[in-house]
């Protein structure tokens, strides 16, 4: 990603301009504000604004008049309790707004999370930049042979080279044609195609950008699904960047999230029963487990 | 409304504690922060936090890297354009969090707006205070004789006195009984009823409180419906207080909202046609209007 | 609950009137349609309409042109897979609409689930009926001494009798006053208080009713929280009734829900580690668990 | 659009299979069920399921036990009243599920409406078909010179021919490369690129498909914005097809929607004042209107 000098200057100007506020301030988040965190080859994540901190979660849970107890240990315990018991509303009381630049095929997965506010750069109104995602060689993976929606080994040699050539050349050609179709030329009697039509020639690895605003509870839900190892690599790196940011913003809430969600496991009633049989010393096999093959594989992936 | 000295001290402490932030700051809103704005006899509205300002709306609409143009006139024009053309997403980029104390029957209307985050004081977990809404004498209205869900003339004399007596006495008695049922008395072999059950004896004019967080677009929708003269007086006063606050927060957005929504009118296709006939000099009557009686009355209420 | 003869006739008329449709039909749900399932002393749950069945979930997951495979075993396996991997969108493709009659304090908990469509009987527009929830003697519980939002032992003797007397008498008196305030009397110069005001005198155990429509995914979320033993008894009985209904509607989806959600357990990262240590033969205590007392108690409640 | 014989057979089979139901049945909608309504060159809209009819809207508004009054005129009046006064919840009580095939750039606009349930065909899991949207010659428009997000005159001659050539050739080449990258060839040591990566080479005019489910209130909101003449042609044709379908499904609700929303006009406070001045005989100009140029142009577009 290469920010233009103008963009860098705008970001620096925003970071430099501080004012007094009586609102809750998160010191960890103030350090993150506006800075462009690079993701993939041309993507970025920037925090534009945020509301609330760990204490604000507790304050909302208590519907209190003031900032409440100053004992951080109390707040941490309350936050863990709320997370463990799926009390989601206090976490909804924090909000964050990101500026994200991302390939269109990633944006299409991302937007399926509907509980957020989005304002996307409009290709009806404006002309997109010539920026395309081209995977790094070690991310160029074959189709998985065991998982219909996963990746297998890394491509090598001539195949890898050819794929990269195709992606680069098709991207450049489609963009050349996009520009060509858009550009009027009076002498040649050329009017220039409408932007809302010309964009249809651009492939899904072109970058778009948007402002994306979400509350902490729904962000955690997004991160649980998208920071998971089943998620596609190209969206997972965005989720990982956002996890780092959230950790700085609301350390206690993030720590509870890490323990109960990211690092947690959902057991079915069947799985609970199996574990109890194992704890009682029984040897359990797929045959006597009552589980399907797929479910048994997932179970033993965790429990051996 | 009488805040306790502790509550006043907590509010003052929050107002006094300011820190530096690089986020967008709304000077008008900073003055409002935490202060208890009185509503009805014991109710209140307090701003607990906010995100964004007029410039943030424009910045999101432009998906820009910086704060953008400093020309306020440009921003105002853009905001009016966005409001006029129902571009709602940039307004969703501002967020506000209120602490509200309100009678339960008002809370029940309020909660029907689902696009907000709510954390209510729990009467399963805690004991409610002895605070009930008793209407001021000039708000004690008869059932409207023309509108099934509206008010008519103010009650007078013996009737008014009797209604106020009933409301006061029933409130006090129900609260006495609530306390009585809750309170254990070991000597008398009395365990004390569970809070989650005892609360069922309390009438709908008891006060509850919640933290309520919403984005600006959805808040405008709420205010358009609830600041309207068709809304029940007891919720309208909350909406009016919030209108004043929003005006200080995002003056340009509020001004556009006032012109296009609050002060605006929705015309049906039929009404457009009627107005055109009138502009052409024709005298239109209900008979030749194609409108029902109700619709015609509403039309002439606006256009004479 | 006593339905009036008119209500019974209306229900029978609806049940009797069948027509041909080419839509998906759930035989188990057709049997439930319109029938009033009694809940509490005056409450009810009725299915008014539904969309989809088990096969429709699979059809949506496959975005298919037809009803797809007729092998029920395939569908069951797919549904279990979708549930296990939190693929929620196919379950959102089924929808159900209920008519529910319930005490106001239950309605206030219920409405916190915002992902549903609700149309409530309006006490601004209409007069409520004289129907109040009075707990059965074996549901009259004391406040729990260990759980701030739970119940303990059943009340007995004089205390129980007194509580029931209070609830009954306050309900009747408040309703008498409600009627009195509402009723105009021209001779006595009494106009009658507006309905939107008079209702404030009614306690939270009065019954209200609404139409409530929700998709299957969000209904499962509701049922998981409200059929849970931590939920208040008075809402749990509604959830239990709806569980029975859903079981008849989409048997495969309900069975997966029962295994993975209702009967399932969420383990934190810490809890996973503890179980692995136990499986490896170690004796784990709260002291060496890294868990708080509350968390340890919840852990041992499940695992001994 | 060319359905395969298998797809046609599946559709016919579904249409032929009727069963008895006690639910509300809309005769107009039964005729539409499953049939593929062609849109653009390869797109389609099919109704997969629906819930409710005009009477169901009224039944919900009345929270009634039966189907209520049989007088259609009463229902029509009530529906018009509800629409005029923005009572949205009764319209939310109807639901419809569509199967839609549409170009990706249209899908990206469409999905911005978040109040719907969506299940899209997965290009991580499956291989997309070789079907691309190529505009008909009379839809190949130049960029508007007055509206930044609109179209101007139709392209002609060499320019039109060249644009069509580019769109066709780039589509075919990108698809050839997509297939090539995907296909393993053991002899050549070629593993085949993962589907989730290969798809990034496909342009935005490729067709995707999804199941899309929405309630009637939110569908009306979608149709108001997308059937509007400001909407891009390629989404407007989908909206127009859906308008025809909704008209058959709930004729009274659609008629009210047409009068109050589609054919209606929103006037600002300023515009109301201007019209009143005109009705009083005054000649109003932009100069004395207080409106900006853009707003004045929009005003005179409607009122002359």
Image: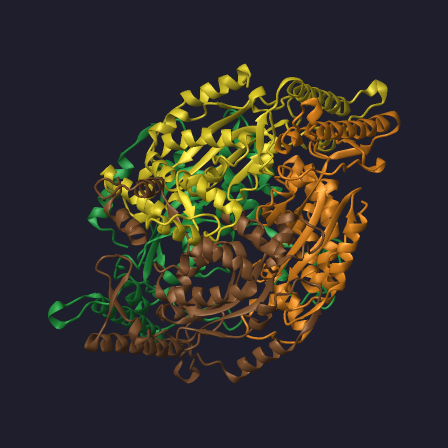
Chain colours: A brown, B orange, C yellow, D green
Up-down relation of residue B168 to residue D296 (above or below): above
**x, y (%) of residue B27?**
73, 67
Q: Residue furthest right?
A: B157
Q: In which quarter of the image is the C terminus of chain D?
A: bottom right
Left/right placement of residue B139 relative to residue A124 reads right
Residue occupying image coordinates x 35% and y 28%: C28
The residue nearer to you, when weighing A161 against D149, is: A161
**Residue B104 appears at what percent x and percent y?**
68, 38
Q: As drawn, which residue projects farthest toward the top?
A: C5
For the N terminus of chain D, which image quadrant?
bottom left
- Tell me residue A212's x, y (percent): 51, 63
Name the residue: 34% across, 54% down.
D209
A291 vs D282, left or right, is: left
Q: Quadrant of residue A169?
A: bottom left
Residue placed furthest toward the left: D187
Quarter-of-image position of residue A291: top left
**Does any portion of residue D234 appear in the rendered image?**
no
Given residues C57 and B76, the one toward you in this image is: C57
Viewer-closest of A201 and C40: C40
Give the answer, above or below, for where C36 lies relative to A50. Answer: above
Q: Is residue C12 above or below residue D293?
A: above
Residue C57 x/y as whole percent: 34, 42
Q: Can residue D257 be seen in this view?
A: yes
Q: How many marks?
A: 0
Residue at 63% across, 41% down? B122
Image-quadrant location for residue D134 = bottom left
């Amino acid at each position: 990603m290469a920010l233009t000098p103008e963009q860098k200057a705008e970001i620096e100007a925003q970071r430099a301009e501080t004012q007094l506020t009586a609102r809750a301030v998160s010191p960890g988040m103030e350090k993150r504000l506006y800075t462009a965190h690079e993701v993939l080859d041309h993507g970025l994540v920037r925090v534009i604004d945020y509301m609330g901190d760990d204490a604000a979660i507790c304050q909302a849970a208590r519907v209190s008049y003031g900032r409440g107890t100053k004992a951080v240990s109390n707040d941490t315990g309350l936050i863990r309790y709320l997370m463990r018991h799926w009390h989601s509303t206090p976490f909804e009381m924090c909000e964050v707004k990101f500026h994200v630049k991302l390939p269109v095929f990633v944006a299409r997965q991302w937007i399926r999370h509907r509980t957020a506010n989005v304002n996307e750069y409009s290709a009806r109104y404006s002309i997109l930049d010539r920026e395309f995602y081209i995977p790094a060689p070690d991310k160029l993976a074959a189709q998985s042979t065991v998982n219909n929606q996963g990746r297998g080994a890394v491509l090598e040699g001539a195949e890898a080279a050819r794929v990269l050539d195709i992606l680069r050349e098709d991207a450049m050609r489609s963009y050349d044609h996009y520009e060509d179709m858009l550009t009027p030329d009076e002498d040649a009697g050329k009017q220039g195609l409408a932007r809302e039509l010309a964009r249809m020639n651009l492939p899904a690895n072109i970058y778009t950008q948007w402002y994306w605003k979400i509350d902490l509870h729904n962000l955690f839900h997004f991160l649980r699904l998208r920071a998971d190892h089943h998620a596609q690599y190209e969206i997972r790196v965005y989720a990982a960047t956002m996890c780092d940011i959230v950790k700085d913003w609301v350390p206690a809430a993030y720590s509870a999230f890490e323990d109960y969600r990211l690092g947690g496991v959902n057991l079915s009633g069947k799985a609970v029963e199996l574990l109890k049989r194992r704890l009682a010393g029984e040897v359990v096999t797929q045959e006597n487990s009552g589980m399907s093959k797929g479910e048994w594989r997932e179970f033993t992936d965790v429990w051996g």
